[in-house]
Image (cartoon, rainbow, N blue to C red):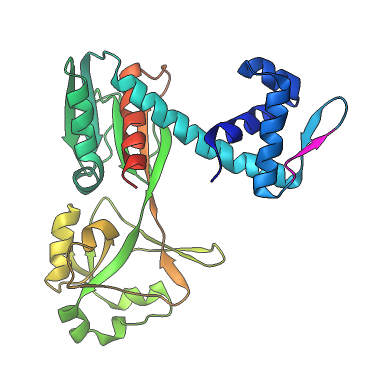
Amino acid sequence: MLGYDDVAIFLRVAREGSFVAAARSLGLPTSSVSRRVAALEARLKTQLLRRTTRAVGLTDDGRAFADRCAVAMDEIEAATRGLDLCNARLSGRLTVTAPYHVCNEDFAPHLLDFAAAHPDLIVDLRLTNGAPDLIEEGIDVAFQLAPLPDGRHVARKLWAAPYGVFASQVFLNRHPEAVGLDHPRGLARLPAIATPPINGWRFVDAGGETFTFGPRALGARVDDLSLGALAVRRGLGVGYLPKGLAGRFPDLVELTFGGWRVADRELYALYPAGRQMPPKVRAVIDHALAARAAHQ
């Protein structure tokens, strides 16, 4: 198992381009830094750094390793900040919006834990499937699924929410042609459950090509995913649903589309642009990331 500290030391050397500079910034002896990086290379059985008498540079493997580790390290640091901020005293009002299903299923308990950790902070949680204007409505942070509306907001990607297309066995008995479609365009022949504001069902193939399907033959139209799942279970049509929601109902069948799969939808945290991120907004975002990482 790789040590967190050894990877952090390697990243600092890669950033500074020198063992001496890295050791100085870390407050460690240069010999210790060099030894820790060498030990990391030995465990990986890969040369990460190209050493010369004047400086060090990344090998191709080292650059690829550093790029991937840097992303992971950012998440760890964000999670650590989230835990640290839980011990800080935040006050005032924090207005948060989130989609009904995503909030209830994924992280509403984490937001309530955050509120409990900050008794001087009033958390005003508003569930909506729409795309509110943060500035006009006085919202501090909005958790929203892509695609995002154009607007005056800064977006930070959090994590992916897996989706699928589902049908009930009753529906499949009436529409056996829905089984084993070779392309998602075949859905155009089937009644579908529309769940606005989701207007396009995105698919991707193994080569990265995308296809967006817009349901036209409507079996029902509801603006809540939980009701959408109920409509699918009643056999009114096929539905584009989060896998976490559909998985609660063993009577639903996930459809397949040959070499195509339903693309994940990315969850973002949005906050108003043109201002520095307030500590309470940073704290709730970092807390959500830390809580999710702890429960994966």
Q: Nearer the viewer, residue 60 or 126?
A: 60
Q: Does residue 9 appear in the picture of this structure?
A: yes
Q: Is residue 252 above or below residue 284?
A: below
Q: Is residue 141 above or below residue 232?
A: above
Q: Is residue 254 above or below residue 291?
A: below
Locate residue 64, reporting x and y percent.
Answer: 66, 45
Q: Residue at x 64, y 18 (%)?
A: 28
Q: Does residue 153 appear in the picture of this structure?
A: no
Position of 68 with respect to 132 (left or right) is right
Locate residue 132, reporting x and y percent.
Answer: 26, 34
Task: Count up the numbered dots.
Answer: 0
Q: Residue at x 26, y 24 (%)?
A: 136
Q: Residue at x 14, y 65 (%)?
A: 231
Locate residue 85, reporting x and y percent.
Answer: 33, 20
Q: Nearer the viewer, residue 105 or 95?
A: 105
Position of 215 with respect to 183 (left or right) is left
Residue 244 occupies quadrant: bottom left
- Magenta highlight: main SS: strand
Position of 214 with respect to 250 (left or right) is right
Q: Is residue 245 above or below residue 80?
A: below
Residue at the outermost right position: 53
Q: Nearer the viewer, residue 150 or 11?
A: 11
Q: Nearer the viewer, residue 24 or 79?
A: 24
Residue 55 occupies quadrant: top right
Magenta residues (range): 47-51
Q: Residue at x 34, y 30 (%)?
A: 285
Residue 106 highlighted magenta (yes or no): no
